[in-house]
Image: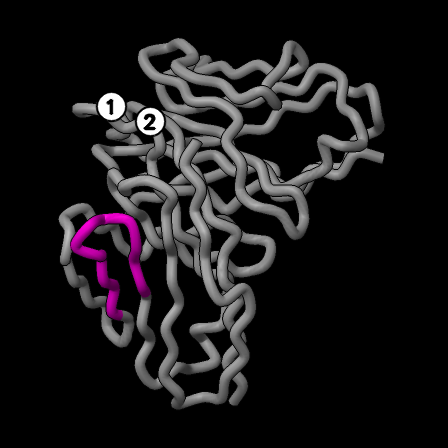
Amino acid sequence: EPEVTQTPSHQVTQMGQEVILRCVPISNHLYFYWYRQILGQKVEFLVSFYNNEISEKSEIFDDQFSVERPDGSNFTLKIRSTKLEDSAMYFCASRVFYEQYFGPGTRLTVT
Amino acid sequence: TQLLEQSPQFLSIQEGENLTVYCNSSSVFSSLQWYRQEPGEGPVLLVTVVTGGEVKKLKRLTFQFGDARKDSSLHITAAQPGDTGLYLCADYPNAGGTSYGKLTFGQGTILTVHP
């Protein structure tokens, strides 16, 4: 069964460093998303992407964040200068019609 | 802003018991998704309910959608330890026509099934 994949599963970085989180959405899906979940809190929306551009972003998704679909399969989230409060699980998701499927997540730890 | 309230927040039961968890919305649902999430993993889609009054079954799980499309329940029959996890409901607060946008999640129900 097709699934969303994410790499790496765990990323440890120092404050101020850049990180790139990678995702491979399900192949026939056209809508892509990033969410994050801080430990013990709700899953919260970061950004949606369709037709090679951002369609919606949350207040969290400031200038330190960017997304890209560099080729026909990968979808990336870049954090330019990480902060301690960026430590969270980051989930990529892709959608067909109204069903949204999530990847296993990348645990980002900023020290 | 749509708010999703799930109850109970925690549920601890013995294997073989039945249980029901609830999801209520401050506004009409567009396409309610139920997910199950295990620690350190991503949410796994269980079912989507769209039509008021709809009932869907997935093995021992029964999902009901209220007639007014503002509430939903998940009933598990004869719970097993493998059912342990965080059960989340989610909806599209900005859905319109064929556009769905982002998902908004409830805070979840943490279910623990003891052997």
Is the residue under label 1 in contact with that under label 2 (CB below 8 Å)?
yes
In this picture, residue A40 sits left or right of residue A58: right
Q: Residue at x 53, y 36 (%)?
A: A44
Disc 1 chain ID? B
In this picture, residue A46 sits left or right of residue A1: right
Q: Residue at x 40, y 67 (%)?
A: B21
- Residue B95 position within the rendered picture, expressed as x and y whole percent measured from the top left: 27, 28
Secondary structure state at the residue bearing disc 1:
loop
Determine which quarter of the picture holds residue B66: bottom left
Tell me the distance, in whole angstroms, between the alpha carbons under discs 2 and 1: 8 Å
- Residue B11 position within the rendered picture, expressed as x and y whole percent measured from the top left: 52, 74
Determine which quarter of the picture holds residue A26: top left
In this picture, residue A82 sits left or right of residue B41: right
Secondary structure state at the residue bearing disc 2:
loop
**Which of the pair A24/B29 is nearer the observer?**
B29
- The amino acid type of the residue labelled 1 equals Ser
What label does residue B94 carry, if any?
2
- The amino acid type of the residue labelled 2 equals Asn
- Residue A13 position within the rendered picture, expressed as x and y whole percent measured from the top left: 79, 31
Disc 2 chain ID? B
Q: Residue at x 84, y 25 (%)?
A: A15
**Which of the pair B101/B6 is nearer the observer?**
B6
In this picture, residue B34 sits left or right of residue A60: left
For the rendered model, the colour scheme is one colour
Which residue in the structure is indicated by mark 1? B99
* Residue B49, magenta (yes or no): no
Looking at the rendering, the stretch of residues picked out in magenta corresponds to: B62-73
